[in-house]
Amino acid sequence: MKNYRNGCTFLITMLITVSFTTGCGYFKVSQLEQISPVGDFSTSEEVIGERDLVSEQKITIDHSILELDQELLFVSSSFRDTFDQSFFNGLTPFQVFQLYMYTLAGEDYETLYYFYNSESMQISKEQFITEGRNDVNSAYTRDFMKKFNEVRKFDVWTKQDSAGVQFVLEAEHEQFTFQLFREGNMWLVSPNPLQ
C-alpha cells in the first residue's frame, strides 16, 4: 500500500507541481457531464467581470493528442536540444499543453523541467529527474498516459494572462484542468498545472 501511495503521490506531483506532496488531494474530480456534440473547433468569447476577456474553444480530434504535427515536432526537438523557452513564442495554450504531455509520455524529465518558469521551481533538476525515473512512479505515469491517450475532446479557456485545458479520463469519469500562464508572448506551464 505504501508503494502505491508513493507512486500515486509522485504521479500527481509530476503532473500538478514539482514540489513534494503527501496526498492525492490536488485533483478536482467531478461527475462526467453530457456535452453536446461539436465540430472540430468552435469558439466563443464573453466578458467576465469588467476586465477579463475569456475565449472558450471546444476541440475534438480524431487521433491521439500525443501525435504531433510537423510544426510541433520541430518545436519539441528544438526545445529538447536547447531548453530555450522562446520556442514557445506564438504557440497557443493548447499547443504548449500538447508539447508538455508529449514530453511526459516520453518520460523526458529533463526537458519537462524546463516547461516551468525557473522561479517557480522548488526542487532541483536532478531531484526532479531522479524522482521521475523511479520505477514505481514511471509505472503510474505510463498508466495515466495510456488513459490520457484515449481522450479526444478538450475545452480550452483563455483569459488575459492565464489559460486552461480541460479534459475527462473516460474510464474514471475524472475531469482535469491543465493550467498555464502567459509570460510575454508565450504560454508556460503553471506551478500546479493539473488540477
Image: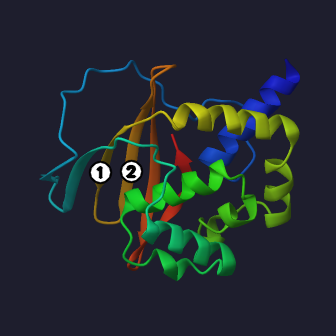
Q: Quadrant of the N terminus?
A: top right
Residue designated by label 2: 164
Instruction: Give the total number of marks visible in the rendering.
Output: 2
Does residue 98 lie above or below 147 as drawn?
below
Instruction: Say which mark, if any, is on residue 157.
Output: 1
- At 46% from the left edge and 52% from the top edge, which residue is drawn? 179
Q: Quadrant of residue 111?
A: bottom right
Does residue 155 lie above or below 48 as drawn?
above
- At 33% from the left edge and 43% from the top edge, which residue is drawn? 61
Q: For the residue labelled by badge 1, is the local secondary structure a helix, a strand or a loop?
A: strand
Question: x%, y% of residue 69?
Answer: 43, 62
- At 60% from the left edge and 81% from the top edge, which residue is drawn? 84
Colour option used: rainbow
Dot 1 and dot 2 residues touching (CB under 8 Å): yes
Question: x%, y% of residue 114?
Answer: 65, 69
Amino acid type assigned to the residue bearing label 1 in the image? Trp
Mark 2, Cα crowd under 10 Å, few <14 / some 14-19 / many 20+, is many
- At 66% from the left edge and 61% from the top edge, which residue is drawn? 112
Instruction: Say which mark, if any, is on residue 94.
Output: none
Task: Report the Cα–Cα distance between label 1 and label 2.
Answer: 5 Å
Mark 1, Cα crowd under 10 Å, few <14 / some 14-19 / many 20+, is many
Relative to the observer, which residue lies in front, 142 or 53? Answer: 142
Relative to the observer, which residue lies in front, 147 or 193? Answer: 147
Q: Is residue 126 visible?
A: yes
Q: For the residue labelled by badge 2, is the local secondary structure a helix, a strand or a loop?
A: strand
